[in-house]
Amino acid sequence: MPDFQLAKLQQLLRGLDRQVDAAGEAFRGQLTRGASDARRKLNTLIDARTGDKGQLLRRPSFTATGTARALDAFLAINARAIASFAQMSDRAATILQVTGTGGQRNADRVRAVARLLEQDLADKLDRVIQDVYGIAQRGQAMAQSAAEVLAEMDEALNTYLTYSRSTYDTALMSFTQALVTTDTSPTSAYVYLGPIDERIRPFCLKLVGTVWTKDRIDTMDNGITPNTFLRRGGPNCRHLWVPAPASMAQFINTGQRVDPSLVEDAAFAARATGIRRTA
């Protein structure tokens, strides 16, 4: 792989970082608004079936179609989430050029991530629709209070929101790492790059600017999620494993940072965050 300018690559990664952050923030905001819309519509459905004593009546019955319609805002949200991956592909082309990676191979990886995300979001939406419909049916059959049924539906919605956010965040991590992955053989070397600031995790602070082979990366534990090569420091991680050029060979598996300025940055971040280990 051709050599590259570390500072220039860092700059490009920061640009991608901003785009990924914006996509994640937009998705989370859309989910929150979608949940508010769903709760309002579910309240309307419940009110139309609540008796004078606050218990659900057996008529009119809930329908699967009506329940699904109450959650239809999430269909549009999922579609926008998939579209955001297409927008980020433009930025990906620049990253591929700088790192000298095979564009077609990495483009295929990115498309695979998008397909998995689309399927996962659809599956999770189907599941919450079924759960909410089941809660409604059970509430009518058992003449539960409207308040109890709404509380159960709210819990199902909150679970859906948590899973959806996690799914999207994981897809974003997979997306960014797929862009710069050129070789997954055990001896291929990667340098850990990204910001050093007050938001950095201890795992990332220890690794930024160091070079490791794929087999050593696979043994690392971020304490949050499995697969530290793909998911790095955990949800919303802003760092990447980038193919290391030949000029960094002397740093492989030593734990030493490739740029002296990174040592100073790490020490400053450690003091700011209270993280002890900076070497």
Image (cartoon, rainbow, N blue to C red):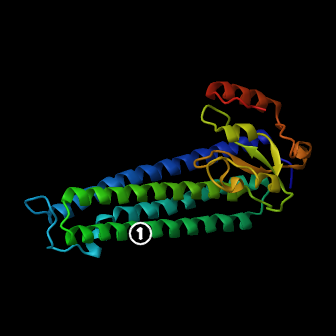
- Which residue shows up at 80% across the image and 56% down it? 214
Q: Is residue 60 above or below residue 247?
A: below
In the visual, does 6 lie left or right of 205? right
Can residue 208 be seen from the camera position used here? Answer: no
Name the residue tied to disc 1.
Answer: 127
| The image quarter in which residue 126 lies | bottom left
Instruction: Categorize mark 1 by other alpha carbons within 10 Å: few (<14), some (14-19), many (20+).
Output: some
Q: Is residue 127 above or below residue 251?
A: below
Residue 229 image position (x, y, % from top left): 72, 54
Q: Residue furthest front?
A: 142
| The image quarter in which residue 193 lies | top right
Q: Nearer the viewer, residue 161 or 9?
A: 161
- Which residue shows up at 53% across the image and 59% down it? 167
**What amino acid is labelled 1 in the image?**
Arg
- Which residue shows up at 58% across the image and 59% down it? 171
Residue 278 image position (x, y, % from top left): 75, 31
In the visual, does 96 lie left or right of 52? right
Can residue 157 be seen from the camera position used here? Answer: yes
Q: Is residue 17 above or below residue 71?
A: above
Residue 36 image position (x, y, % from top left): 31, 53
Q: Quadrant of the N terminus?
A: bottom right
Q: Residue furthest left?
A: 52
Q: Quadrant of the C terminus?
A: top right
Q: Nearer the viewer, residue 121 or 4?
A: 121
